[in-house]
Image (cartoon, helix red, strand yellow):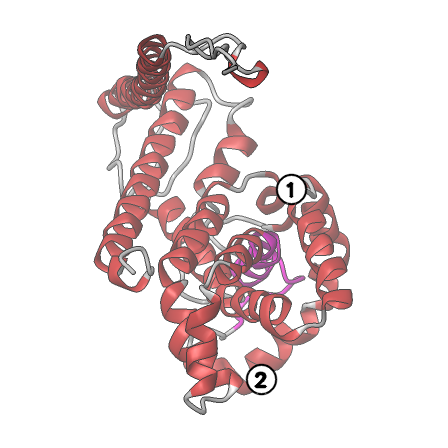
Amino acid sequence: MATATTHGPTPPSGRDQGPQTDPLKSSAASRAGDKAFLGLSRGSGITLLVIMAAIAVFLTYRAVLAISENEGNFLTTSEWNPAGDPPVFGIAVLAFGTVVSSVIAMAIAVPIAIGIALFISHYAPRRLATPLAYVVDLLAAVPSIIYGLWGAIFLVPYLDGLNKWLDQYMGWTYIFDKTSDGVARNMLTVGILLAIMILPIITNVTREVFLQVPRMHEEAALALGATRWETIRMSVLPFGRSGIISASMLGLGRALGETMAVAVVLSPSFVISGKLLDPGGGTFAQNIAAKFNEADEFGRDALIASGLVLFAITLLVNGAARWIIARRKEYSGAAA
């Protein structure tokens, strides 16, 4: 006798009995999350622009008050009289000192930072590279006042011999002609101190950029018979060029706005001089920090006016850096 077979729907297995996710609801939730993230991102960008605009408006308003009450020339007058009514001030001296000290710092720090970053990322063994990178990170966290005290107590006395040597053998260049007596509280010392301060920042960012170089680029260069230096020159440095520029601009931003370290080390004089071994004219940040408390209402407006010039210089420098990075975009490897 044949056994009757019951045909009917197959009961679902245990694996298929769980709750089913509605793809429409999932898609709707995803769209809601995207909209929320887009709104937060857009709001953050707008907030940043509003803050920048508010700072610019405040500085411009107070600067206009100072310029309208100023009897001298805004750029060239070098006399400072914070107790006077109205004050007389000159911005060119501070701009010159700020730019010169920052250029010295960048000329010293950038090549050394690139060398340290290359050593940590491509030459040093891991047992040495890890603690060395940690030390560089710690140096970046040291407060500026500590650097200033170290510069005043240790760096200034020990640079006196260097100043005398430069004056003796390089004084014919005019730049290293020392005409004033006293310790080395000059623009060269400030530039060296700023270079030490910005060195960890540039090194950290540059090292991370070098570590992002595609391994296959380096292996291809080595396979073609290139030496290690040729591999770095042809693969690593072109790939990290935009990152090096960005790191340098971060360091330059700190050098331009450094206050306490410069105030502790420098003996300012309101004179524009190309002699780096003589007392310099001061910087914007150092001058504001040193004279803000003693200035009256108009004097503070004058200091804020100098802050507006520093703000404009910073925007120009960063804008130039972004333009250079955009022109070098093909070397970043982003299009690969």
Q: Residue at x 53, y 10 (%)?
A: 17
Picture coordinates of residue 242, whole percent (x, y)? 35, 58
Toward which corner of the image does residue 80 lie, by quadrant? Answer: top left
Residue 179 in magenta stretch:
yes
- Which label sits on residue 161? none
Q: Would you call the spot at circle 2 few (<14 residues within 10 Å), some (14-19), or many (20 or more)?
A: few
Q: Amino acid type of disc 2?
A: Gln
Q: Nearer the viewer, residue 303 or 246?
A: 246
- Which label sits on residue 168? 2
Picture coordinates of residue 205, whole percent (x, y)? 52, 53
- Horizontal placement of 276 versus 49: left or right? right
Q: Amino acid type of disc 1?
A: Ser
The residue sitting at the front extreme is 1
Q: Secondary structure at mark 2?
A: helix
Toward which corner of the image does residue 274 lie, by quadrant? Answer: bottom left
Start-end of magenta stretch? 178-200
